[in-house]
Amino acid sequence: MPSDRRMFLGAGLGVTAALASRASALAASAQAVSSDGPPPPANVRLEPEIRAAAAHDFGRLVHQQPRGVLRPASSADIASLMRWAKSRAVKVAARGQGHSIYGRSLSADGVVVDMSAMNAIREIQHDRVVVDAGAVWRDLLDATLAQGLTPPVLTNYLGLSVGGTIAVGGIGATSSRHGMQTDNVIALDVVTGDGNELSCSANSNADLFDGVRAGLGQCGIVTRATLRLVRAPERIRRFQLFYRDLPSLTADQRRVLTEGRFDQLQGAILPDGSGGWRYQLDGAIPYSSGSAPDDKAVLSGLSDERGAAVIADLSYREDALAFGKFENLLRSKGLWSNPQPWLLTFLRGSNAERVAGDILAGLKGDAVGPFGRITLYPLLTKVFHTPLVRLPEEDVAFVFNLIRIPASNDAAAAQRMVAANRTLYDRIREAGGVQYPVGAFAISPGDWEVHFGSSWPQLREAKRRYDPQHLLAPGYNVF
Ligand SMILES: Cc1cc2nc3c(=O)[nH]c(=O)nc-3n(C[C@H](O)[C@H](O)[C@H](O)COP(=O)(O)OP(=O)(O)OC[C@H]3O[C@@H](n4cnc5c(N)ncnc54)[C@H](O)[C@@H]3O)c2cc1C
């Protein structure tokens, strides 16, 4: 039989099976209704394959099947779901692109709200954009660049949703200048856990605004966001500098940070392929044609291995999308869909070299996999203002992330890395560090209370007010 025909028949069988399973799922739900109260809104999808797709996230470490999936067309759809969920005490998790690592967008036997169709980019003005929360940053950037504008902070990977990064903070290469993405939010439309549709900003429902930005989805589902825009640079000159060891890398990172030499500053420690590490500083300077940076001045006095330096010129868009090449590489090797037990933290500036060095010394060569990396770079903390974003309380903090990309699909090995993450997190916390709340390890409500520290009462109060039945974002295990 020709393969096209086989595919056609296969697809036909799939549809028939899907219709049959939807009918039986509806029947099961109708039966449940007669004994247990009102049925879910008719637009909640119950088909097994739709529920199965919402049962895992990018990390592939936690699997929890929801009882249904809502693909809302409007904020009113979400509000009526929440009113039903309230009447039945059903847990609800928003899902942007499902790129959380440890089941944060899952809802065991609850409902997942798949935001991906609520992705309209509505209105672009010279200083702001209004966008639906399911839009991905890549599409938002393309729309704003058409008018010569950009959000001031972009995550390294642009396949994340606006709502998904607002839930955690949203850090990127320009964060030392502009803070988190949550620092650049002007206003939000939210459906709260008790089913109300509210707008909030610094001047209106400010407690909700502060509870939602970096609030791990605990107080409401963001449906629409008004975000700050700035003029986009035309071009980016990128400097990749290499170092013989950790102290020389961080000494130069501290120097260029203090002197403000780069608009974008990051860095990493990478496996060198023979059991050791390579130390890399990534700096970038935006410019317009005709005013390129003076490379000699930019690099003067730095102690990198100059012969190895890589200097590249890119358009602003090419630079912003650069992570896409890495994604394609991992996909081509089958590694993108392996379990991803990442650990993301911030170290105190005053002991970052010691803590990072000690941890590095204890890591085995395969700790991050051949394509993984340890992200390490300093930030100025004074530009971060979102109340629920936690950073060490010092002028300088270091991003310290173990981007573990295992070479195999070995679930047991991945779980060992998750356990190791917890041990490392405890060490880092002991040394005054904090987690960036997207990592893969088990964490209890008590841990979250410690994590949020002086901001905990604020989050607890917002939760009490806007999601009193604790229905939202159960995957974080905060309450
Ligand atoms: C390849 C990769 C690269 C990454 N790079 C960066 C980076 O450069 N910088 C950075 O800061 N982070 C980065 N992350 C982490 C990422 O920002 C978070 O995991 C983020 O939450 C994922 O966004 P998402 O749209 O996939 O959200 P999901 O995984 O779908 O959801 C994550 C959490 O947010 C909640 N949520 C989602 N949408 C909404 C909404 N509309 N309203 C309220 N809550 C909502 C969910 O309920 C869930 O609790 C990266 C992750 C991956 C996998």
Image (tube, grey):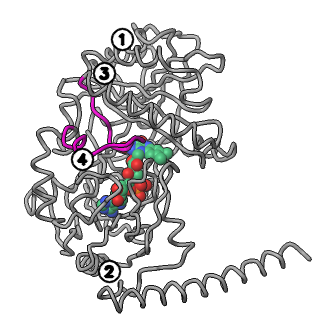
The amino acid pointed to by label 4 is Pro
Q: Report, in whole angstroms, how far the alpha carbon at label 4 lies from the one at label 1.
A: 37 Å
Indicate the quadrant where residue 359 lies. top left
Q: In the drawing, what numbered circle is on residue 77?
A: 2
Residue range corresponding to the magenta coloring: 432-450
Q: Position of residue 449 (x, y in %)?
A: 19, 43
Give the foreground label among 3 and 4. Answer: 4
Q: Is residue 381 left or right of residue 78?
A: left
Q: In the drawing, what numbered circle is on residue 445?
A: 4
Identify which residue is drawn at 53% across, 9% down: 305
| 137 over 437 or under it: above or below | below
The amino acid pointed to by label 3 is Leu
Q: Position of residue 130 (x, y in %)?
A: 29, 64
Q: Earlier in the sequence, mark 2 or mark 1?
A: 2
The amino acid pointed to by label 2 is Asp
Q: Earlier in the sequence, mark 3 or mark 4?
A: 3
Give the foreground label among 4 and 1. Answer: 4
Q: Report, in whole angstroms, how far the alpha carbon at label 2 lies from the one at label 4.
A: 30 Å
Q: In the drawing, what numbered circle is on residue 257?
A: 3
Classify the position of the N terminus by image quarter.
Answer: bottom right
Q: Are marks 3 and 4 in contact (CB under 8 Å)?
A: no
Residue at the far right in the pictured view? 1
Q: Position of residue 146 (x, y in %)?
A: 43, 58
Q: Is residue 301 left or right of residue 195?
A: right
Identify which residue is drawn at 41% across, 75% down: 70
Magenta-colored stretch includes residue 449: yes
Q: Earlier in the sequence, mark 4 or mark 1?
A: 1
Residue that mark 1 sits on: 251
